[in-house]
Image: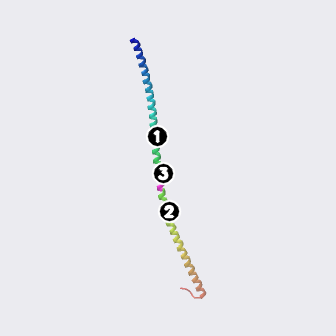
Amino acid sequence: HAEADLAAAKQELATARREVDEAKQALLLCNTKLNKAKEEADAERRSSSEAKNALIMVQANFRETEGRMVKYMEVSNAHYVALQRSEKNLLEAQRALKEVQKEGQEGKQDGMPRP
């Protein structure tokens, strides 16, 4: 009867060992899946971080370009104002010239020289 108990105990031990081995295999598989998930999460974070850095660079470039554009517009506006002033001065000079020419014509008609 003791031999039968010993045989049954050995059978139970073998079954328990198989179950432990199966549990170890399942645990290894879970660890593998967990590590893969961690790697994917790390890659996602890196990718997200790279995307954030790229966005920061794009925003910085945009602000720099916007600043240059504002300066260009200010300079352009100053040139436009100067051009308008020059056109006004030119028109005034043309009017003055016509007046001088007109006076010169009138002087020739009178026969009297103008100073």
Q: Position of residue 18 (x, y in %)?
A: 44, 22
Q: How many marks?
A: 3
Given contact means CB atoms under 8 Å apart, are the residues at marks 3 and 2 in contact?
Answer: no
Given contact means CB atoms under 8 Å apart, are the residues at marks 1 and 2 in contact?
Answer: no
Nearer-the-camera pick, 109 or 96: 96
Asked where in the image residue 22 lies, by quadrant, the reply is top left
Nearer-the-camera pick, 81 or 105: 81
Please give the label number shown on residue 58: 3
Please give the label number shown on residue 94: none
Q: CA distance from mark 3 to mark 1?
A: 22 Å
Secondary structure of the magenta portion, mostly?
helix
Question: Quarter holding the N terminus?
Answer: top left
Which label lies toward us, 1 or 2? 1
Q: Position of residue 78 (x, y in %)?
A: 49, 66
Tag 2's secondary structure? Answer: helix
State the extent of the magenta-drawn residues as a range: 56-64
Write down the residue under mark 1. Answer: 43
Q: Amino acid at mark 3?
A: Val
Identify the mark nearer the N-term, 3 or 1.
1
Please give the label number shown on residue 73: 2
In this view, 82 is above or below 47:
below
Nearer-the-camera pick, 50 or 114: 50
In this view, 92 is above or below 22:
below
Q: CA distance from mark 3 to mark 2?
A: 22 Å
Report the residue that reaches farthest toward the top. Answer: 1
**Residue 63 colored in magenta in the image:** yes
